[in-house]
Image: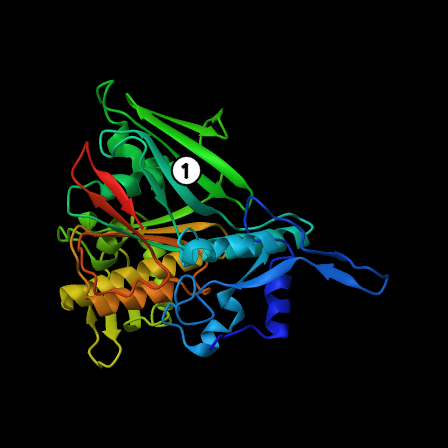
Amino acid sequence: MREDFSAATKETIAGRAGYQCSVPYCRRTTIGPGASAAETASVGVAAHIYGASPGGPRGSGQLASEELRHPSNGIWLCADHARLVDTNEGKAFPPSLLISWKGLAEAAATAGRDRSGHHSFCWLHRMKILDSTVLVAGSELRFGKVTLLRGANGTGKTSLLQWIAGTFDSTHLAKWMSARSDRDHVVFDLEVFVPEQQRIAVRLQAERAEYFLDAVPVAATPIPMAVVFLSSERMERNDEDDVTVVARALNVAPLRVANVVHNLGVVVDGYVAKAQCLGPIGQSRLMLSLRGSSRFASIFGHSAGERECALIEIAMALAESYSRHSPTLLLIDYGRAPLDDERLDRYANALQDDRYPFQTIFAWADQTDGVKWSGWESISLCGYPPDTRVSQD
């Protein structure tokens, strides 16, 4: 049975896209005057992101019938692109890409409606490595709303996240801007939509970072992207108070952690039920209780797995706070696998939710296939520098 959209749902999908094709390099207007003065004519189609029927293009995404019929599972396309995205079972247009395009189209429609032209949107679409000492030149990565970056320790996951973060905040490039030989350099570019398409190129060499926007040299990337970068490498305690340690893991000031702690407990499908900072910064304890437990203890009084969940939810709360006012990117870097498949899958699905209007890249050392990966972009790094290769289905 097909799970077709109702007429009202089609109108909602079309209206949210401004009646323009959601393919960013098309943007064709799909509605206009009809044959008579009382008619309109449309060449638009409300296409399914996940298939409308069993065995359809892109599969069902394990969605229930009502979810397959919901406006969130629809993207507005011109008739030509509606046919194209379903060609060859939709393999060239995965759900993560269509979800990205849907978000871009709705952001563009919002910006066009707002006379001030103000919008808070930036979407990482594609990264190309032109030259590096880590990945093979010519490697390309495609990003979705949530992207899983998998590979063994030492394959280059952290380097990639540092380059991406450093595109918008050069402090993340400290390692790459130290004294280095002339042959030890990195050149890459990022294709982004803001919502119009732009290309940012970055060249790192001999203590210099050079930026180019659409091939024009700039002092720094002018796109105001906020970056939240959680790294397990920065989680050493060193006899410091709880908030200071967590802040270092997130590369932010301790006050920012203290200010978002009260938002824990409302994370979609999260594990933290309650959180509170006790004592001044420098002597603080970050107290947590988990769902289904009455135990209220310091974050370091919980198990390693529980602590990692709390850190991820603090990062999510911080990114959500930033995203209310600025395009935001959440990067989570773990050199090991601190979460079981069920917990990781829960975070994957939560981060796909519209209540988190930012992109996430999750670097993961585990190669398990126990997670459903519904809606994820999944990228694997194979081999070791300087010959690491990218594999992406």
For label 1, the crowd category at 10 Å Cα-Cα, with few meaning under 14, some 14 to 19 and many 20 or more, is many
With 383 as the anchor, is 6 left or right in this view? right
Nearest to the observer: residue 30 or residue 233: 30
Q: Position of residue 232 (x, y in %)?
A: 20, 51
Q: Position of residue 130 (x, y in %)?
A: 34, 29
Q: How many marks?
A: 1
- Residue that lies at the very extreme toward the front in this rendered image: 88
Residue at position x 37%, y 61% in the image: 375
With 194 as the anchor, is 176 left or right in this view? left
Question: Can residue 118 be spotted in the picture?
Answer: yes
164 shown above or below 109: above
Colour scheme in the image? rainbow
**Residue identifier under label 1:** 190
Amino acid type at circle 1 is Leu
Question: Can residue 278 be spotted in the picture?
Answer: no
Residue 41, quarter of the rendered image: bottom right
Query: What secondary structure is marked by label 1?
Result: strand
Q: Position of residue 24 (x, y in %)?
A: 54, 47
Nearest to the observer: residue 317 or residue 333: 333
Nearest to the observer: residue 96 or residue 306: 96
Residue 279, quarter of the rendered image: bottom left
Residue at position x 55%, y 52% in the image: 81
With 51 as the anchor, is 280 left or right in this view? left
Residue at position x 34%, y 72% in the image: 269
- Residue that lies at the very extreme toward the right in this rendered image: 37
Residue at position x 16%, y 38% in the image: 384
